[in-house]
Image: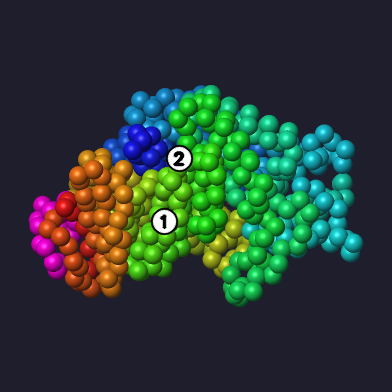
Amino acid sequence: MRELTWWQRGVIYQIYPRSFQDSNGDGIGDLRGIAERLEYVSALGADAVWISPIFPSPMADFGYDVADYCGIDPLFGSLSEFEQLVIHAHHLGLKVLLDFVPNHSSNRHPWFEESRSSRDNAKRDWYLWHDPAPDGGPPNNWLSRMGGSAWEWDEHTEQYYYHAFLREQPDLNWRNHEVRRAMDGVLRFWLDRGVDGFRVDVLWLLIKDAQFRDNPLNPCYRAGEPEHHRLLQTYTEDQPEVHEIVRAMRATLDIYGDRVLIGEIYLPVSQLIKYYGAAGDGADMPFNFQLINARWNAAVIAGMIRDYDGALPEHAWPNWVLGNHDNPRIASRVGAIQARVAAVLLLTLRGTPTIYYGDEIGMTDGTIGPDEIRDPAELRQPGAGQGRDPERTPMQWDDSLPNAGFTSGKPWLPVASRSSVREQEGDTSSMLSLYRRLLILRRCHAALVQGTIENVAAHGDVLTYERHYRERSLFVALNFGGEASAFESRPATVLLSTAMGRDGGPLTHGTNALAAGEALVASM
Ligand code: GLC
């Protein structure tokens, strides 16, 4: 087997910068704050931090509306502070990944300001401008993912522009080669500053249908779902031409050596795997979000693991994601006990795991009062289940009141609960201790990192699988149910269990028992 590279062996830790650590009392996290906490991330056992956008931005979508791709928003710090952060992280053995947001810029980006200034401006074609339909309305039926038409009328030049998200986030025209060159320059700018790779925002949306055809109606749409689900995204996502763009990004990263290209892609596995590139010349890791939407059921997850592993091309390296800044937290989706099962699952599956900040202490979604809502997705479609504030609340560092050590000021979102890093650090039964033990286990057992995954099976509420590498074999059993359950095993020694007092104990040949919500890893 080939030597694995750092991003195959490693574990990624996602930092949502507004919420990780505030250093200046303005209630919003910043780069100095992140720097103060890097030792914590390193001691946890992560290998890389992915930092969500920190670039100059009017913050209509909290940084996913970029007004300057090659700078740092003063809210977060400065370019030199960022460079210090990279040095500091590298010193601790941590890689640094940035969020690259190429699909759309801010409407305040100078490129867009030029583009909208006149129809014959040199940058007009950098965005998606279109004449109205014959009735004067939007050019087609495309809907914004934040609600309403995806077309915004521009009074001054009498054309519409396309925005897949907010009207403050006009989509760039990736069919335009100057746009491609400019964006390539952005990648190089950060690579030159030592960045180890990128998570590319909405990679599967970059190219839209050249003929701007109407999207078909979605026959499965159910009332109450977000509005854009009314249509199938036939002409607005996953267009075949996107793959040549991914290849070009990959080629640029390759010039710099061992850098990682990760794509944010919400697609079924059969389409997702195409983003690896036909010859392994695409993304290193198209994010695998299946666990985020999965029904929490042993048979469902067993099927998912088998199908994913079976579908991956030979050159493709798997990955698993349990949570992020766009989805309810795992502890709120499945409850505190099953969140521990989920931790064992995430860190023992084959492939690179991504941990969302705070999940390692079992953070739950915060309760956001009507006056505290900040997320534009919620403000534009109230009650549609799109609100992302609950999973973006401040990291809970200690028990200091009122803001858990996150800020000395008023936090931009309320603190979700009191359980904190400090409280859990000294408690061997805590979620934090479980994460740390699991991450140590990964380092000590090559089978967990390099091993094959085999015999994935579900019996009732229990999911079991094996990891094999050379002569070493590990066995994993997870109880997705609320009652004790039996499972079959070969003789083995428990290395780690979520149930206290079981570590080092035996599994006998034949039938063994798992407590309700217990998960264990054993050496065979
Ligand atoms: C991605 C981001 C999300 C953002 C959207 C638009 O899905 O993760 O937070 O709102 O892109 O940039």
The magenta region covers: 493-512
Q: Earlier in the sequence, mark 2 or mark 1?
A: 2
Q: Is residue 440 magenta?
A: no
Image spot of residue 195 (x, y percent): 49, 30
Relative to 170, is 352 on the left or the right? left
Q: Residue 70 or 191: which is nearer the viewer?
A: 191
Q: Residue at x 51, y 51 (%)?
A: 273
Q: Quadrant of residue 462?
A: bottom left
The mark closer to the camera, 2 or 1, is 1
Is 169 on the left-hand or right-hand side of 411?
Answer: right
Colouring of the image: rainbow
What is the C-alpha distance between the residues marked 2 and 1? Answer: 28 Å
Looking at the image, is 208 positioned above or below residue 487?
above
Task: Please name the residue shown 24% across and 51% down the image.
Answer: 434
Which mark, residue 310? 1
Image quarter (top left, top right, bottom left or bottom right) of the N terminus: top left
Residue at image location 41% in from the left, 33% down from the top: 95
Cβ–Cβ below 8 Å for labels 2 and 1?
no
Residue 216 seen:
yes
Q: Is residue 413 visible?
A: no
Q: Nearer the viewer, residue 149 or 173?
A: 173
- The quadrant where residue 188 appears: top right
Pointer 2 residue: 50
Hey, what amino acid is under mark 1? Answer: Gly
Q: Nearer the viewer, residue 472 or 221?
A: 472
The label number, if any, that marks residue 95 in the structure image: none
Amino acid type, callout 2: Trp
Q: Residues within 10 Å of mark 1 (few under 14, many from 20)?
A: few
- Is label 1 in a helix, a strand or a loop? helix
Residue 504 falls within the magenta-colored stretch: yes
Left/right of residue 352 with respect to residue 494 in the rendered view: right
